[in-house]
Image (cartoon, helix red, strand yellow):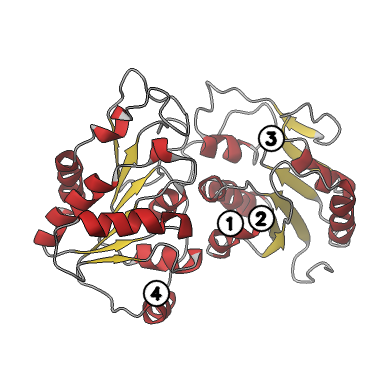
Amino acid sequence: MPPSAHFKHRTLVVAPSWIGDTIMAQPLFMRLHKNIPDSQLDVLAPPWVAPVLRRMPEVSEIVDNPFAHGELSLRARYRLARQLAQNKYERAYVLPNSLKSALIPFLAGIPERIGFTGESRYGLINSRHSLDKAALPQMVERFAQLAQAPGTPLQRPVEQPRLVSTPEQQAETLAAVGTERPTKVAVFCPGAEYGPAKRWPARHFASLADELVQRGYIIWLLGSGKDKAVGDEIIRLARSQPGALRNFCGETSLSQAIDLIAVATLVVCNDSGLMHVTASLDRPLVALYGSSSPGFTPPLSDQATILSLQLKCSPCFKRECPLGHLNCLNKLEPQRVLEACLKEITP
């Protein structure tokens, strides 16, 4: 991996392992491009987040990070570090707070290694930021802070992420999945990788689908293969005519999901990676929160409406409801979500 001759400077970023977190790192990438002219920005990332990085114009190259969460594999990390050393990076930004995430830039001999102190990473991180959670309540702010010198206040406002989806990419994806560009389409993202306590019930999605179909919409369900069963359940529970709902869960790549969301009239999402994808594409969005909080990782878009019942027991940040009732989502009625949807799409 020899250095690119076109750029005078080269920077490495160690990306997070979640899709949403990686999208929230884009404002940092934007600031680095502005602050370090004539610099190539490479990102070390796991393969499942690479598709969103490919839609960020600030990213030059993506380096595969093959290590699973919690996996040390010190010898393999050393081999990858020695390969990266050939690129002669001047600096590295380490976004995760774990000690393991800081090893490769250190072993690669990158002179300036920037990040929060995290897990006592003295030495591994040599340009250390101290985290003030009150001053930087949002994840996107914490990432953006790393573009500035340690101890300086964050420059606001923070930019909003913006993924690229061109008309040509959209046309290619629509042809690949065998559908035409619809006049009115609502995308539902019924999954949430974190757990059931972040998932609005299938019966509520089905009721919302029926209401939107009556208003001339078709419904696309998007998600991973893990979400196929809930997508099938939504279609089974819906009373709309056959063909009004289509379950794409597990049938598209993440890159294709980006393009399908980009053509949507409206998107309804749980707090998930696809929620952040939607926000970054600036589509009208209704985001549903249960066990999590929009305070730390909100959808970063002026077209997003956040719905949360804000019960006394939430946010609990649990994967499953510790009280067994999931009232934070069960009692978020479809009619309330429908009203938010109609408000989002009314000129």
Disc 1 versus disc 4: nearer the observer: 1
Residue ID for mark 1: 49
Direction from residue 22 to residue 69 in the image, left or right: right
Q: Which amino acid is tagged 1?
A: Val
Residue ID for mark 2: 46
Secondary structure at badge 2 equals: loop
Residue furthest out toward the left:
214
Residue at 71%, 44% (x, y): give it. Answer: 93
Task: From this view, report whether residue 297 is shown above or below residue 265.
Answer: above
Which mark is on residue 97?
3
- Tell me how far mark 4 sits from mark 3, CA to CA: 36 Å
x and y, in percent, of residue 240 in the image: 14, 62
Which one is nearer the viewer's eye here, 247 or 91?
247
Asked if labels 1 and 2 touch by Cβ distance under 8 angstroms, the answer is yes
Which one is nearer the viewer's eye here, 29 or 318?
318
Q: Which badge, 1 or 3, comes first in the chain's sequence? A: 1
Q: Which badge, 4 or 3, comes first in the chain's sequence? A: 3
Residue at 50%, 27% (x, y): give it. Answer: 137
- Tell me how far mark 2 sits from mark 1, CA to CA: 6 Å
Residue at 12%, 54% (x, y): give it. Answer: 211
